[in-house]
Amino acid sequence: MIVSSVYGFSQKDEVKELLVWRNHILQQKEKPMSSLNFSVLSGKSVTWWDGNSLMVLIDEDEGGKSFEMYNPETGSVFATIKTEGKTGFAKESGLTFTLHKMGETMLLVAKEEGKMYDIFIQVPDQLTSWHFIDTHDVLDGLYITPDNTQYVFGLPEMFEGVTKYTEDPGVFMVPQSANPMDDTWNYRILYGDGRISHGRYVEDPEKRNMPGAGGAGAIMGPMEWGLNITDKGLTGKVLHDEPTVDHNPRITEEFTLTKIQTPFKGINGIWTFASVRPLNRMMLIHFPKEILRLMRNEIYARHGVKFSSDATIQAYFDNQPWYKATANPSPLTGLEMLNVSLIKAVEDRLEEN
């Protein structure tokens, strides 16, 4: 068995922060959801993240509070939110905002023309690498190929029976902006920056000018993977790699990965993150609408709901070994109801487009 670990942080302290953050969110998932007045934020510096932009409290007075929404990569502010009581409004985007609390975590819910648009989750100031977390919650899992080779997306500590790390010294994953002329892949990610060349001999003299071909010990850049999301896991291909670096899969290989375990123990299904943490639009827009539909209904299926009005969905979950329909399904948590609304909103917009 070969285990390749693809995880978000190569520094030990950042890995520890990620695990702490995950455990904190896991503890909040069944807490009741309550609506709050924006006045509770008085005197607090609070930051929210929606997978793409940050929102920060910048000013407060007797008439309400003001927030700025900005792109952390460029530092540019693209919206200002004015709040009063339980409502906030961004003139630039037309979005309205409400403040909610789930256990110890605060959420900002954004709506457009009265319909769910996005969810901003409160992020701790000390978590310096929170911007990687969303992609990992989408893709993390223990996967298996048809030849029983196993791959780990995420930290091996999160999965049962996984004890071996990849030998690559620096491993990370970052979602890339897809080429608008190439819609082949749901995700394009970089993997393995900072690997060390084994210095294999290259017979063609012209290739000696390629990175790493000069000998052992050269630091390599990352390979690029293209990934598509399926109802069982992932399909993909290595689109680019540096030469003279051993890796698995090979550059010419197209691979099929079936998810056999998720990081969240005791929760059934493939897209378990949808019952564990607040979602955001950026996590969902990479999914085909057919998969979003399954993800949304998987939340209900975990509670034992029977899909009497949809034979296709019922047949799909009847084939899942963990699914058991019941005459008295358990109620969705406040978090799950919020996520169901967001998934449906993204589905509807994909349908419209």
Image: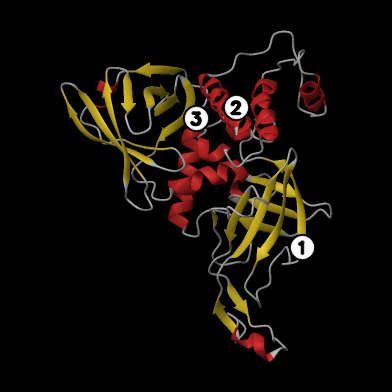
Residue placed under numbered mark 3 in the picture? 27
Mark in the foreground, 1 or 3:
1
Residue at image point 84% right, 55% down: 147
Q: Which amino acid is tagged 3? A: Gln
Residue placed under numbered mark 1 in the picture? 253
Residue extending furthest toward the left: 62
Query: Between 89 and 21, which is closer to the camera in this rendering?
Result: 89
* 255 relative to 200 in the view: left or right: right
Task: Say which label, 1 or 3, has the lower sequence index.
Answer: 3
* 44 relative to 274 in the view: left or right: left
Model colouring = secondary structure
Secondary structure at numbered mark 2: helix
Residue 243 versus residue 255 in the image, above or below: below
Residue extending furthest toward the top: 327
Quarter of the image with the C terminus in it: top right
Residue at image point 57% right, 39% down: 285
Quarter of the image with the N terminus in it: bottom right
Residue placed under numbered mark 2 in the picture? 348
Is residue 165 shown to the viewer in this render? no
Q: Position of residue 347 (x, y in %)?
A: 61, 29
Whole-angstrom CA distance, mark 1 to mark 2, is 35 Å
Is residue 132 shown to the viewer in this render? yes
- Give the image quarter of residue 249: bottom right
Secondary structure at numbered mark 1: loop
Residue at image point 27% right, 17% down: 85
Task: Say which label, 3 or 2, has the lower sequence index.
Answer: 3
Q: Position of residue 228 (x, y in %)?
A: 69, 47
Mark in the foreground, 1 or 2:
2
Query: How dense is the environment of label 1, judged by Cα within 10 Å: few (below 14), some, or many (20 and up)?
Result: few
Query: Between 224 and 332, which is closer to the camera in this rendering?
Result: 224
